[in-house]
Amino acid sequence: MPDHDRVEGAAKNIGGKIKEAAGKVTGDEKLKAEGRADQVEGKVQNAVGGLKDTLRDGRN
């Protein structure tokens, strides 16, 4: 079972992509930037979850 951070990070990444796309369609630069920031946050959170998974699997 993947760590909760991996799932939540993936969701933030997808949400960020949607937000960035909406910003592109509407011409809203702030929304695009927020979407990019959400994607970075999601990728970092996903990586943390992956590290937790690796550490947990190494103990088993």
Image: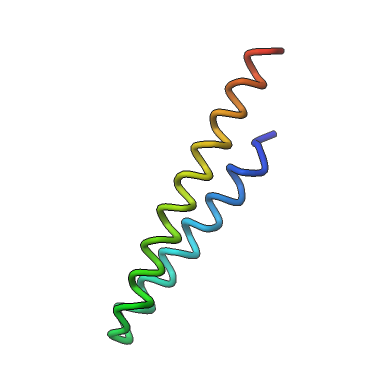
Which image quadrant is residue 2 in? top right
Task: Tell me: 41 left or right of 55.
Answer: left
Task: Tell me: 49 left or right of 26.
Answer: right
Q: Quadrant of the C terminus?
A: top right
Q: Where is residue 59 in the image (x, y as percent from the top left)?
A: 68, 13
Question: Looking at the picture, does residue 34 appear above or below residue 49?
Answer: below
Closer-to-camera residue (29/8):
29
* Count of numbered tags: 0
The residue under the point 38% across, 77% down is 31
Farthest residue toward the bottom?
Answer: 26
Q: Where is residue 7 in the image (x, y as percent from the top left)?
A: 61, 47
The residue under the point 70% across, 34% down is 1
Closer-to-camera residue (15/29):
29
Q: Where is residue 17 in the image (x, y as percent from the top left)?
A: 41, 64
Question: Looking at the picture, does residue 29 appear above or below residue 50?
Answer: below
Question: Looking at the picture, does residue 31 appear above or below residue 38?
Answer: below
Which image quadrant is residue 33 in? bottom left
The residue under the point 67% across, 21% down is 56
Q: Position of residue 20 (x, y in %)?
A: 37, 70
The residue under the point 46% across, 53% down is 41
Colour mode?
rainbow
